[in-house]
Amino acid sequence: MKAVFLDAGTFSAEAHLPAPDGISDYQVYDSTPNDAATIIARCQDADIILTNKVLLSAEIIHALPKLKLIQLTATGTNNVDKAACDACNVALYNVAGYSVDSVPEHTLMMMLSVMRAGSYYHSKATDGTWRSDGKFCLLDMPLFDLANRTLGIIGAGAIGRRVGELATAFGMHVLYAERQDKTVCRAGYTAFDEVLANSDVISLHCPLTNDTAKLINAKTLAKMHKKPLIINVARGGVVDAASIVQAIHQGQILGYASDVFDNEPFADDDCLLNIADHPRVLFTPHNAWGSLSAQQRLWQILSTQVSQFIQTYSQNG
């Protein structure tokens, strides 16, 4: 079968990405623009499309009669028209479980960096401020310990649970939030509003759905009585960016750390850029998932899925 990888450049140069078994013709592009004509031209003869974030619309899927499988190199599937896949009998696979170490460790890195004002103090240590001050240490920005603080986790899947385990090792008290609209809490969960009210840190790990779109907004921010640090490693759309900016400016929250955004990379006019220099704000370029070991684990899972699909298709063909 012929496979086309549309955006291999979303992986590190050090990652080893051999063609899965069963692929006889393998075309790899570093990147592909979200232009229907270009995508159709590149995939016209493809049995399998591999992609991370290229948008595959109904128009594109209907224009590719040979297409049998879309294999995403990610967990989220919102960049593919699922109804068109069903209508055209195209299988849609994603990859899950590959970043259960990488994302939680990134989350803790962000938590520690903001609570300890890491980027602020790095700048002061190297820009001459420390030398000018003359004392052996600088402590003009408060440092906060994680121990004995409360972490509220929204999205208690494998990644959220692992974040909870790591936070517990730091001595934090962990609350797992029940869904916002639920009046009865499942065992081990805490009411959503109670988590908002009582957390020193709130970490987002939920998928982007109709129920979670702009889940963190002016209304929910107003329920956060302890002025928490908010961490978003879920999806950009889970927060209302304008409300976050306002909350930072008004001192309504301690800080904001995010690896995900509405536009990736940032649009020039993204309102979050207005707080980028705040000492309690930390942005990373959607790479929490991407430790080298996580990338290799992802590719192993993907390769097995694709090879099994090809084998099954051949047997049933």
Image (cartoon, rainbow, N blue to C red):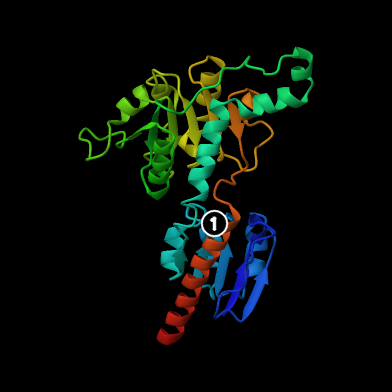
Relative to the observer, which residue lies in front, 40 or 275? 275
User: Is residue 40 toward the left or the right of residue 71 in the image?
Assistant: right
> Could you tell me which quadrant the C terminus lies in?
bottom left
User: Is residue 315 toward the left or the right of residue 72 in the image?
Assistant: left
Within the image, what quadrant is residue 163 found in? Answer: top left
Relative to the observer, which residue lies in front, 206 or 173? 173
Relative to the observer, which residue lies in front, 281 or 184? 281
User: Is residue 267 toward the left or the right of residue 307 in the image?
Assistant: right
Question: How far across and down, in percent of the image, does residue 42 sit?
Answer: 66, 68
Instruction: For mark 1, give the secondary structure.
Output: helix
| Residue, far left | 184
For the image, the number of numbered tags is 1
Residue 297 seen: yes
| Residue drawn at point x = 58 percent, y = 52 percent | 291
Question: How far across and down, in percent of the image, does residue 252 sit?
Answer: 48, 17
Does 189 appear above or below 83? above
| Residue, far front | 136
| Residue drawn at point x = 55 percent, y = 65 percent | 299
Does 317 appear above or below 229? below
| Residue drawn at point x = 35 percent, y = 23 percent | 198
Residue 68 seen: no
Question: Residue tagged by mark 1?
Answer: 294
Question: How far across and down, in percent of the image, does residue 82 sit?
Answer: 44, 59
Amino acid at the residue labelled 1: Ala
| Residue drawn at point x = 48 percent, y = 57 percent | 98
Does 125 appear above or below 181? above
Within the image, what quadrant is residue 242 found in? Answer: top right
> Could you tell me which quadrant the N terminus lies in?
bottom right
Mark 1 Cα within 10 Å, few/some/many (few <14, many 20+)?
many
